[in-house]
Image (cartoon, grey):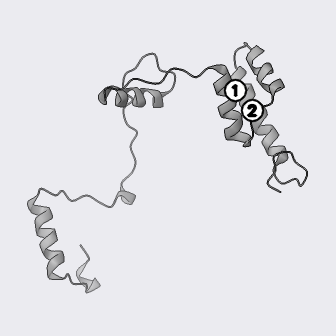
Amino acid sequence: MPPADAHKTFRPGEIAALHRWIAEGAEYQEHWAFIAPTRPTVPAHASEENPIDAFIRTRLAAEKLTPSPEASRLELIRRVTLDLTGLASSPPEVDAFLSDRAEGAYQRLIDGLLKRSARAVGTPNGSTGCW
């Protein structure tokens, strides 16, 4: 509530709303901006590599839903290339990614796309620049 030295008053409708709120069991809490964030406990899903996946799987289970199947490598390169460059991947890029079965292939693809996008931005003759 405003401090007394603020000299603010409430209209009757506002006061009635506050009374209803309290009667319905309202709990006073500081404004969210003044509450320090806390790290939630990660749900137990032993097979997850990323904690975010554990939260998603828990929510899916609560909603009685199942996750979509894992995307194919072809779908992955199409999605990430469109997301990072705004353009479809070229046939040679697709072939190179599909044939790269070494550990970290997807991360190398992303790194290469990010480097390509970084070079193109801000150059008038860049292949994917915004000029």
- Mark 1 residue element: helix
Residue occupying the far left of the picture = 23
Q: Which residue is mark 1?
A: 107
- Callout 2: 10 Å neighbours few (<14), some, many (20+)? few
> Which type of secondary structure does the marked residue at label 2 adopt?
helix
Q: In front here: 7 or 11?
A: 11
Q: To which residue does mark 2 refer?
A: 111
Mark 1: amino acid: Gln
Which corner quadrant of the image does residue 40 belong to?
A: top left
Question: Which image quarter is the N terminus in?
Answer: bottom left
Residue drawn at (30%, 29%) of the image: 62
**Picture coordinates of residue 32, whole percent (x, y):** 35, 57
Residue located 47% across and 20% down the image: 48
Quick check: marks 1 and 2 in contact, CB under 8 Å?
yes
Q: Position of residue 111 (x, y in %)?
A: 75, 32
For residue 122, above or below residue 90:
below
Disc 1 packing (10 Å; few <14; some 14–19; many ≥20):
few
Q: Is residue 103 left or right of residue 28?
A: right
